[in-house]
Each structure stands twice: as structure tokens, then as C-alpha cells.
Amino acid sequence: EAGVAQSPRYKIIEKRQSVAFWCNPISGHATLYWYQQILGQGPKLLIQFQNNGVVDDSQLPKDRFSAERLKGVDSTLKIQPAKLEDSAVYLCASRGFRGPGGEQFFGPGTRLTVL
Amino acid sequence: DAKTTQPPSMDCAEGRAANLPCNHSTISGNEYVYWYRQIHSQGPQYIIHGLKNNETNEMASLIITEDRKSSTLILPHATLRDTAVYYCIVRGQETSGSRLTFGEGTQLTVNP
């Protein structure tokens, strides 16, 4: 089966600009996650969707980050305006009910550089 | 969710078994031990998980001590492609609101 797709793979912007990332989860997966991974650290969950509803956004910096999953399939994560500390890899993951209890499938990530 | 402690790095010779330890002394009775790995420039990949019994799949074996305070991930015949950061994560059922919290993991380097 096809994996989690993300685009773009790389993005370079200047601070205070806006940027958006796109994720298409594995077909049929109801749960979708966005993670932020700063260089040298493990991924940190930003937001979790169940179908098109938000389950957990407690670690999302809501003053500048937003995410949506309007039709319960693909999702976009937006940063507006970007700061230097937002430089990181943004990972999307999905999970289906057939998984062995919590297995998440990750996409390749989008590497964001803020100058 | 319980916190885990892993060594920052380990080396292993190609073809030998790689044994990656993880301490989780504050684990509670309904929390699982998960292992993921992340190869350079890729997203994390699920390896295995367990509650209290030892588990084995096509990728690895997971040995959990009887008191559940520590575990070991075993890659029986390590290859160069197993070079990655390995994350040990303790969490409850996702339906209870528990999230996957990654630490800094163990950088495993498999040498030829």
C-alpha cells in the first residue's frame, strides 16, 4: 500500500513569511498527526486529528500555527508568521484501526529552514 | 506517560546481535513499551511493542523484565541498514489520551 505522502520535501523562507505543508495519509486511516522535529531531538506532537476533528492540540503554538483536515483525508499545517526557531522537520503520520494498537506510519517529512 | 532512559549511542558489528537497553522504572500497569527507529532523513518507523510478555516479529525481539522496569530491543543479525536512532517509548492506550512522546533515543551505528 502507498505510504504517507508529504509535500514539499524542502522549504526555505525568511522570518515573518508564511508557509504551508501538505499531508496525504494512508488510505482509510482515520487518525492523522503532525509532529515537529528539531535537529538532534525526537519528534514532538503538534496536533492529532480523528477524521476531521481535533483530538489533541495542546502543544500547538496557536498564535502562529494552524492545521486543518476538512474532509477527513488530507491535511495542511500552516505557520504564519514564521520565526527562526521554527526551523525543523515537520512530520505527518497516520494510524488505522487495523494497526496493532498504536502503530503510526510516518511520512518522509518536510524540512523547513527559516532565515 | 512514564519517562524512559536510553544510552545516547551504541556500536555493533555487522552480522552480530544488537541489544539496545531501555529503562522505564516508573512504568504503570497499563502502559506499553514501544520501539520506533529513524533512519537518517526519513520519518520514524514502528518496530515492535509489548506489555509484559516478550515479543518477536520479523524485525526484532523485545524482552521486558519481569518487574517491567526495563526492556531490551534485540536485532538478531544487524546490517548496515539498521544504522539509525532507536526510540523507546512508554505510553498507555491512545484511546485514553496518551500520546507518543519521543525522547532523544539511541544512535546505533552498525560497522562493517
Image (cartoon, coloured by chain):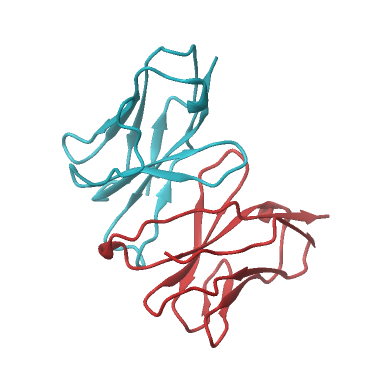
What is the x, y in percent for residue A105?
Answer: 41, 51
Q: Is residue B82 above or below residue A37?
A: below
B25 vs A8, nearest the viewer: B25
Name the residue: 16% across, 36% down. Answer: A71
B108 vs B1, nearest the viewer: B1
- Residue at far bottom of view: B66
Name the residue: 51% across, 63% down. Answer: B3
Name the residue: 60% across, 51% down. Answer: B104
Relative side of B106 to B58, left or right: right
B84 vs A56, nearest the viewer: A56
A33 vs B68, nearest the viewer: B68
Residue A74 lies in what quarter of the image?
top left
Name the residue: 22% across, 36% down. Answer: A69
Question: Which color was chain A given?
Answer: cyan
- The chain that appears red in the image is B
Total labels drawn = 0
Relative side of B5 to A86, left or right: right
What is the x, y in percent for residue A115?
Answer: 55, 14
Q: Is residue A6 above or below residue B13?
A: above
What is the x, y in percent for residue B11?
Answer: 78, 59
Q: Is residue A58 above or below residue A87?
A: below
Q: Is residue A66 above or below residue A45?
A: above
